[in-house]
Image (cartoon, rainbow, N blue to C red):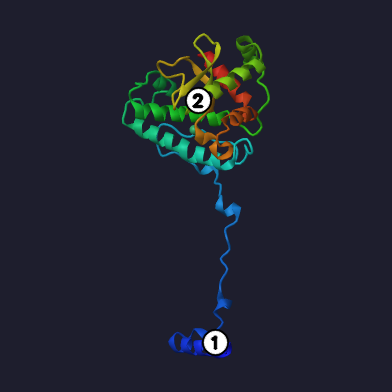
Protein backbone atom coordinates (compact mmCIF):
# COMPACT_ATOMS: atom_id res chain seq x y z
CA UNK A 1 0.00 0.00 0.00
CA UNK A 2 2.79 2.36 0.96
CA UNK A 3 4.54 1.59 -2.32
CA UNK A 4 1.49 2.44 -4.29
CA UNK A 5 1.04 5.70 -2.41
CA UNK A 6 4.66 6.68 -3.05
CA UNK A 7 4.35 5.90 -6.73
CA UNK A 8 1.19 7.94 -6.95
CA UNK A 9 2.81 10.85 -5.14
CA UNK A 10 5.82 10.72 -7.41
CA UNK A 11 3.68 10.51 -10.47
CA UNK A 12 1.81 13.62 -9.35
CA UNK A 13 5.05 15.44 -8.60
CA UNK A 14 6.58 14.43 -11.92
CA UNK A 15 3.58 15.86 -13.64
CA UNK A 16 3.71 19.13 -11.72
CA UNK A 17 7.44 19.75 -11.05
CA UNK A 18 9.57 16.90 -12.26
CA UNK A 19 11.02 16.62 -8.73
CA UNK A 20 11.18 12.84 -8.65
CA UNK A 21 13.41 12.57 -11.69
CA UNK A 22 16.63 12.94 -9.69
CA UNK A 23 17.83 12.51 -6.17
CA UNK A 24 18.25 16.19 -5.39
CA UNK A 25 19.89 15.75 -1.99
CA UNK A 26 23.14 14.67 -3.67
CA UNK A 27 23.53 18.19 -5.01
CA UNK A 28 23.66 19.92 -1.63
CA UNK A 29 26.82 22.02 -1.54
CA UNK A 30 28.60 22.38 1.77
CA UNK A 31 29.60 26.00 2.44
CA UNK A 32 32.73 25.94 4.62
CA UNK A 33 32.52 28.13 7.72
CA UNK A 34 35.26 30.75 8.04
CA UNK A 35 38.05 29.69 10.36
CA UNK A 36 38.81 31.67 13.52
CA UNK A 37 41.77 33.27 11.73
CA UNK A 38 39.58 34.43 8.85
CA UNK A 39 36.97 35.92 11.13
CA UNK A 40 39.53 37.87 13.13
CA UNK A 41 41.79 39.29 10.49
CA UNK A 42 44.29 41.46 12.28
CA UNK A 43 45.89 44.17 10.17
CA UNK A 44 49.24 45.87 10.51
CA UNK A 45 49.93 49.12 12.41
CA UNK A 46 52.16 50.17 9.49
CA UNK A 47 49.06 50.55 7.31
CA UNK A 48 47.48 53.16 9.61
CA UNK A 49 48.16 56.73 8.54
CA UNK A 50 46.52 59.94 9.62
CA UNK A 51 44.96 62.22 7.04
CA UNK A 52 47.16 65.19 6.20
CA UNK A 53 47.63 67.71 8.98
CA UNK A 54 49.95 68.88 11.71
CA UNK A 55 50.13 65.60 13.62
CA UNK A 56 50.88 61.99 12.78
CA UNK A 57 50.40 58.82 14.78
CA UNK A 58 53.38 57.61 16.77
CA UNK A 59 54.66 54.41 15.23
CA UNK A 60 53.85 51.15 16.91
CA UNK A 61 57.12 49.22 16.64
CA UNK A 62 55.45 45.83 17.14
CA UNK A 63 52.45 43.86 15.84
CA UNK A 64 49.00 44.15 17.37
CA UNK A 65 49.31 40.69 18.90
CA UNK A 66 52.73 41.31 20.47
CA UNK A 67 51.34 42.32 23.87
CA UNK A 68 49.06 39.30 24.27
CA UNK A 69 47.91 37.94 26.63
CA UNK A 70 48.29 41.17 28.65
CA UNK A 71 46.56 43.21 25.94
CA UNK A 72 44.91 41.19 23.17
CA UNK A 73 45.43 41.82 19.45
CA UNK A 74 41.88 42.96 18.72
CA UNK A 75 41.91 45.54 21.51
CA UNK A 76 45.24 46.89 20.27
CA UNK A 77 44.05 47.06 16.68
CA UNK A 78 40.79 48.84 17.48
CA UNK A 79 42.51 51.19 19.91
CA UNK A 80 45.35 52.16 17.58
CA UNK A 81 43.78 51.98 14.13
CA UNK A 82 40.37 53.41 15.00
CA UNK A 83 40.29 55.34 18.27
CA UNK A 84 43.77 56.89 18.14
CA UNK A 85 43.47 57.51 14.39
CA UNK A 86 40.12 59.27 14.88
CA UNK A 87 41.54 61.57 17.59
CA UNK A 88 44.47 62.40 15.30
CA UNK A 89 42.34 63.15 12.25
CA UNK A 90 39.87 65.19 14.28
CA UNK A 91 42.68 67.17 15.90
CA UNK A 92 44.26 67.93 12.54
CA UNK A 93 40.91 69.10 11.22
CA UNK A 94 40.22 71.25 14.30
CA UNK A 95 43.70 72.83 14.19
CA UNK A 96 43.51 73.58 10.48
CA UNK A 97 40.77 76.07 11.36
CA UNK A 98 43.02 77.91 13.85
CA UNK A 99 46.37 79.68 13.82
CA UNK A 100 48.02 77.19 16.23
CA UNK A 101 48.69 74.53 13.60
CA UNK A 102 52.46 75.00 13.89
CA UNK A 103 52.59 75.49 17.67
CA UNK A 104 54.22 72.71 19.75
CA UNK A 105 51.51 70.47 21.19
CA UNK A 106 52.50 71.12 24.81
CA UNK A 107 52.00 74.85 24.31
CA UNK A 108 48.57 74.28 22.74
CA UNK A 109 47.65 72.09 25.72
CA UNK A 110 48.85 74.63 28.29
CA UNK A 111 46.89 77.46 26.67
CA UNK A 112 43.81 75.38 25.95
CA UNK A 113 40.41 77.00 26.38
CA UNK A 114 38.67 74.26 28.40
CA UNK A 115 35.26 75.36 27.14
CA UNK A 116 36.32 74.33 23.62
CA UNK A 117 35.17 70.72 24.07
CA UNK A 118 36.00 69.58 20.55
CA UNK A 119 39.62 70.70 20.79
CA UNK A 120 39.93 69.60 24.43
CA UNK A 121 38.83 66.01 23.69
CA UNK A 122 40.79 65.55 20.48
CA UNK A 123 43.94 67.32 21.66
CA UNK A 124 43.94 65.28 24.88
CA UNK A 125 42.97 62.13 23.00
CA UNK A 126 45.87 62.57 20.59
CA UNK A 127 48.49 63.50 23.20
CA UNK A 128 47.44 60.85 25.73
CA UNK A 129 47.33 58.00 23.24
CA UNK A 130 50.65 59.01 21.69
CA UNK A 131 52.23 58.69 25.12
CA UNK A 132 50.38 55.46 25.94
CA UNK A 133 51.44 53.67 22.73
CA UNK A 134 54.99 54.98 23.06
CA UNK A 135 55.58 53.51 26.49
CA UNK A 136 54.18 50.05 25.71
CA UNK A 137 56.51 47.23 24.73
CA UNK A 138 56.30 43.44 24.52
CA UNK A 139 59.65 43.38 26.34
CA UNK A 140 58.53 45.49 29.26
CA UNK A 141 58.34 44.99 32.94
CA UNK A 142 61.88 45.56 34.16
CA UNK A 143 62.44 48.31 36.71
CA UNK A 144 63.56 51.81 35.73
CA UNK A 145 67.28 52.62 35.84
CA UNK A 146 69.62 55.57 36.31
CA UNK A 147 68.23 59.06 36.92
CA UNK A 148 64.59 57.95 36.79
CA UNK A 149 65.24 55.18 39.33
CA UNK A 150 66.88 57.71 41.65
CA UNK A 151 64.01 60.19 41.23
CA UNK A 152 61.44 57.46 41.96
CA UNK A 153 63.32 56.46 45.12
CA UNK A 154 63.63 60.11 46.14
CA UNK A 155 59.94 60.98 45.60
CA UNK A 156 58.15 57.70 46.47
CA UNK A 157 60.59 55.91 48.79
CA UNK A 158 61.18 52.93 46.50
CA UNK A 159 60.10 51.46 43.17
CA UNK A 160 57.72 49.13 45.02
CA UNK A 161 56.15 52.09 46.85
CA UNK A 162 55.75 53.87 43.52
CA UNK A 163 54.01 50.82 42.07
CA UNK A 164 51.56 50.67 44.98
CA UNK A 165 50.70 54.36 44.61
CA UNK A 166 50.36 54.25 40.83
CA UNK A 167 48.20 51.14 41.01
CA UNK A 168 46.00 52.77 43.69
CA UNK A 169 45.58 55.93 41.62
CA UNK A 170 44.56 53.84 38.59
CA UNK A 171 42.17 51.68 40.59
CA UNK A 172 40.45 54.63 42.22
CA UNK A 173 39.73 56.34 38.87
CA UNK A 174 35.95 56.47 38.60
CA UNK A 175 34.73 56.06 35.03
CA UNK A 176 36.74 56.91 31.95
CA UNK A 177 40.08 58.61 32.41
CA UNK A 178 43.78 58.21 32.95
CA UNK A 179 46.37 57.76 35.71
CA UNK A 180 49.71 59.50 35.24
CA UNK A 181 53.27 59.71 36.41
CA UNK A 182 54.07 63.40 36.08
CA UNK A 183 57.12 65.64 36.41
CA UNK A 184 56.03 68.92 38.01
CA UNK A 185 57.59 72.35 37.50
CA UNK A 186 60.15 71.74 40.28
CA UNK A 187 61.29 68.43 38.74
CA UNK A 188 59.47 66.35 41.35
CA UNK A 189 57.61 63.19 40.34
CA UNK A 190 53.92 62.99 41.19
CA UNK A 191 51.05 60.63 40.51
CA UNK A 192 47.65 61.95 39.49
CA UNK A 193 44.41 61.13 37.65
CA UNK A 194 42.39 62.96 35.03
CA UNK A 195 38.86 62.46 33.69
CA UNK A 196 37.99 61.71 30.08
CA UNK A 197 40.82 62.78 27.74
CA UNK A 198 42.14 65.54 29.99
CA UNK A 199 45.78 65.50 31.07
CA UNK A 200 48.06 67.30 33.56
CA UNK A 201 49.32 69.77 30.95
CA UNK A 202 45.87 71.32 30.63
CA UNK A 203 44.93 74.41 32.67
CA UNK A 204 43.39 73.88 36.12
CA UNK A 205 44.78 70.34 36.55
CA UNK A 206 44.81 69.01 40.09
CA UNK A 207 48.52 68.23 39.64
CA UNK A 208 50.21 70.22 36.88
CA UNK A 209 53.19 68.88 35.00
CA UNK A 210 54.48 66.84 32.10
CA UNK A 211 53.20 63.27 31.97
CA UNK A 212 55.96 60.71 31.34
CA UNK A 213 53.85 57.55 31.78
CA UNK A 214 50.10 57.10 31.45
CA UNK A 215 47.60 54.28 31.66
CA UNK A 216 44.41 54.46 29.65
CA UNK A 217 41.51 53.53 31.94
CA UNK A 218 38.73 53.76 29.38
CA UNK A 219 36.87 50.48 28.94
CA UNK A 220 37.96 50.29 25.29
CA UNK A 221 41.54 49.79 26.49
CA UNK A 222 40.85 46.48 28.22
CA UNK A 223 37.20 45.34 28.13
CA UNK A 224 37.40 42.66 25.38
CA UNK A 225 39.98 40.77 27.36
CA UNK A 226 39.26 41.68 30.98
CA UNK A 227 35.57 42.66 30.98
CA UNK A 228 34.94 44.32 34.37
CA UNK A 229 38.27 43.19 35.85
CA UNK A 230 40.05 46.50 35.37
CA UNK A 231 42.23 45.74 38.38
CA UNK A 232 43.85 42.83 36.52
CA UNK A 233 44.49 45.02 33.45
CA UNK A 234 46.16 47.61 35.67
CA UNK A 235 48.28 44.89 37.29
CA UNK A 236 49.34 43.45 33.91
CA UNK A 237 50.10 46.91 32.50
CA UNK A 238 53.29 46.85 34.59
CA UNK A 239 54.55 43.95 32.45
CA UNK A 240 54.37 46.15 29.36
CA UNK A 241 56.07 49.35 30.44
CA UNK A 242 59.06 50.44 28.39
CA UNK A 243 61.06 52.03 31.24
CA UNK A 244 63.79 53.16 28.86
CA UNK A 245 61.22 55.28 27.03
CA UNK A 246 59.77 56.59 30.32
CA UNK A 247 63.27 57.58 31.37
CA UNK A 248 63.76 59.40 28.06
CA UNK A 249 60.49 61.27 28.72
CA UNK A 250 61.76 62.10 32.21
CA UNK A 251 65.07 63.49 30.91
CA UNK A 252 63.23 65.63 28.35
CA UNK A 253 60.81 66.92 30.97
CA UNK A 254 63.46 68.00 33.49
CA UNK A 255 65.59 69.67 30.81
CA UNK A 256 62.88 72.26 30.29
MN1 LIG B 1 42.03 54.92 24.61
Horizontal relation, residue 87 to residue 154: left or right: left
Please name the residue shown 62% across and 19% down the image: 164
- Whether residue 86 is visible, yes or no, is yes
**Residue 18 as seen in the image, left or right of residue 119:** right
Quadrant location of the N terminus? bottom right
Across and down, in percent, residue 108 comes to 39, 22
Residue at 53% across, 88% down: 5
In the rendered image, the residue lying farthest to the front is 1
**Dot 1, crowdedness within 10 Å: few (<14), some or many (≥20)?**
few
Q: Which of the 4 image quarters holds residue 234?
A: top right
Q: Nearer the viewer, residue 229 or 89?
A: 229
Q: Earlier in the sequence, mark 1 or mark 2?
A: 1
Q: Is residue 49 above or below residue 17?
A: above
Residue placed most toward the observer, 13 or 178: 13
Q: Residue at x 59, y 31 (%)?
A: 233
Report helix, strand or loop for mark 2.
strand
Which mark is nearer the camera, 1 or 2?
1
**Place of residue 67 in the rendered image (x, y in percent of width and height, measured from the top left):** 62, 37
Q: Find disc 1 in the rendering and name its residue.
A: 6
Judge by depth and name the residue closer to the eye, 85 or 18.
18
Q: Which residue is mark 2?
A: 178
Amino acid sequence: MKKILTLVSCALLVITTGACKRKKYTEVVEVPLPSVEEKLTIGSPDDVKAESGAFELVELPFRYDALAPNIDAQTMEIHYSRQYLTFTNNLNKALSRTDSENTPIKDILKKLDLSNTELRNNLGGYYNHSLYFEVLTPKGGAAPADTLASAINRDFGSFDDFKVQFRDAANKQFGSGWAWLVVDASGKLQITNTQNQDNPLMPRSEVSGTPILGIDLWEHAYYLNYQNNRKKYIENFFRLINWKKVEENFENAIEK
